[in-house]
Amino acid sequence: MRVWDAGGFGQIHFDSAAIGEPLLGWIIENRVIQHALLERARQLPAVDLLCPAALEAIQALDNDRWRVQLNDERAFTTRLLVGADGAQSKVRHWAGINTGGWKYDQSAVVANVRSAKPHQETAWQRFLPTGPLAFLPLHDGRCSIVWATAPEQADALLALDDAAFADALAATFDGRLGAIVDVGSRAAFPLRLQHAHAYVRPGIALIGDAAHVVHPLAGQGVNLGLLDAATLAEVLLEAIATGHDIGSLRVLRRYERWRKGDNLLMMGVMDGFKRLFGASLPPVQWLRNLGMSLTDAAGPLKNLIARRAMGLEGDLPRLARGAG
Ligand SMILES: Cc1cc2nc3c(=O)[nH]c(=O)nc-3n(C[C@H](O)[C@H](O)[C@H](O)COP(=O)(O)OP(=O)(O)OC[C@H]3O[C@@H](n4cnc5c(N)ncnc54)[C@H](O)[C@@H]3O)c2cc1C
């Protein structure tokens, strides 16, 4: 992975060989992961898939149970409802859980593109004052780009024809991978930081973006959600094994405690990076570049950062350690 600052001399190079690993990670299209998980769920006899039905309303019952109403007339009672319904989570809203956070003055333009030079199985990120531009390597030689920039510039980039967009992209990327020779469909998403004040209520647990939305500059959003899911699964299995109610606050708070600190740390670090690289004051720019260069030269610190981002460090649930 190569990261560099458009406003100076700072750069960092992460190499899996330096920490004795074959890879730093995988870039996988979200729909591929979702498809694989859905196929697995279909194979499990204990899972009933109700889709394409959507959740329409929930109602609190006695004993901390919830009545769940679907949009196809079906309804049922549940001991635990897991809200994995994204940043606009209705489950969170119905459970009366508020969120904190703020909008960034940035939108992210995403697309798959092909560059004249090969991506070299490397994730590339250039930090500009307007936001980071990332090229993430795909298996077929293309790159998935995430270009965070001012909302009005994002709109202008969407309005360009493919050739003009390709030229703007190559120029903003410093020509690192040469000309952009093919551009797929483009979309833009407003960016924000959002954190639920609580992850749990009696009979309810929030996971993924329903609980937290981070800046995508380190591509950690899905990873955090998967860690939530793995942690909740572990906590619930233990509760079942010890005869506890899986919907009780006592059980669910264990999940919340385990994940909240880790998620807050990641949110804080991403937010700090966003602000640090958005700063245009010369002394801040100079210090930032010096910090990057020193980190690059300091092997142990750099390796610690890499191992943390790879999910090899920290208080990980068993599923995330490959322990099953
Ligand atoms: C521009 C951009 C780039 C990003 N890049 C990366 C990256 O490189 N790597 C990374 O890890 N993350 C990235 N992220 C973050 C990542 O997209 C999110 O963290 C992730 O998609 C959150 O997953 P989720 O399942 O929690 O929520 P979502 O993906 O929002 O899924 C929620 C699901 O719930 C369903 N749903 C909602 N309401 C209901 C209802 N009432 N009934 C039934 N179903 C319902 C929705 O249909 C949807 O399928 C990026 C985000 C942005 C904006």
Image (cartoon, rainbow, N blue to C red):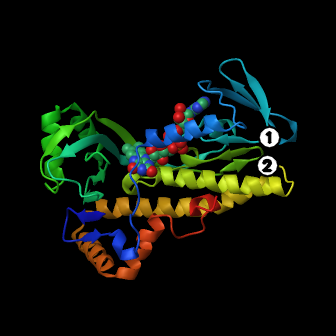
Give the alpha-carbon distance from disc 1 to disc 2, as whole Å. Answer: 7 Å
Q: Which mark is residue 286?
A: none
Q: Position of residue 119 (x, y in %)?
A: 23, 54
Q: Quadrant of the N terminus?
A: bottom left
Q: Is residue 52 visible?
A: yes
Foreground residue among 16 and 280: 16
What's the amino acid at mark 2? Ile
Left/right placement of residue 209 relative to residue 72 reads left
What's the amino acid at mark 1? Arg
Alpha-carbon neighbours of circle 2 within 10 Å: few (<14), some, or many (≥20)? many
Q: Residue at x 13, y 35 (%)?
A: 163
Alpha-carbon neighbours of circle 1 within 10 Å: few (<14), some, or many (≥20)? some
Foreground residue among 76 and 216: 76
Q: Which residue is mark 2?
A: 246
Left/right placement of residue 124 relative to residue 21 reads left
Q: Residue at x 34, y 82 (%)?
A: 298
Residue 228, relative to residue 95: is it above or below? below
Residue 113 picture quarter: top left
Q: Residue at x 24, y 67 (%)?
A: 281
Residue 75, relative to residue 292: is it above or below? above
Do the residues bearing badges 1 and 2 touch, measured as CB atoms within 8 Å? yes
Q: Which mark is residue 79?
A: 1
Foreground residue among 204 and 306: 306
Badge count: 2
Q: Quadrant of the C terminus?
A: bottom right
Left/right placement of residue 273 relative to residue 317 reads left
Q: Position of residue 277 (x, y in %)?
A: 30, 62
Tell me the SS state at disc 2: loop
Residue 125, relative to residue 45: is it above or below? below
Left/right placement of residue 75 relative to residue 220 reads right
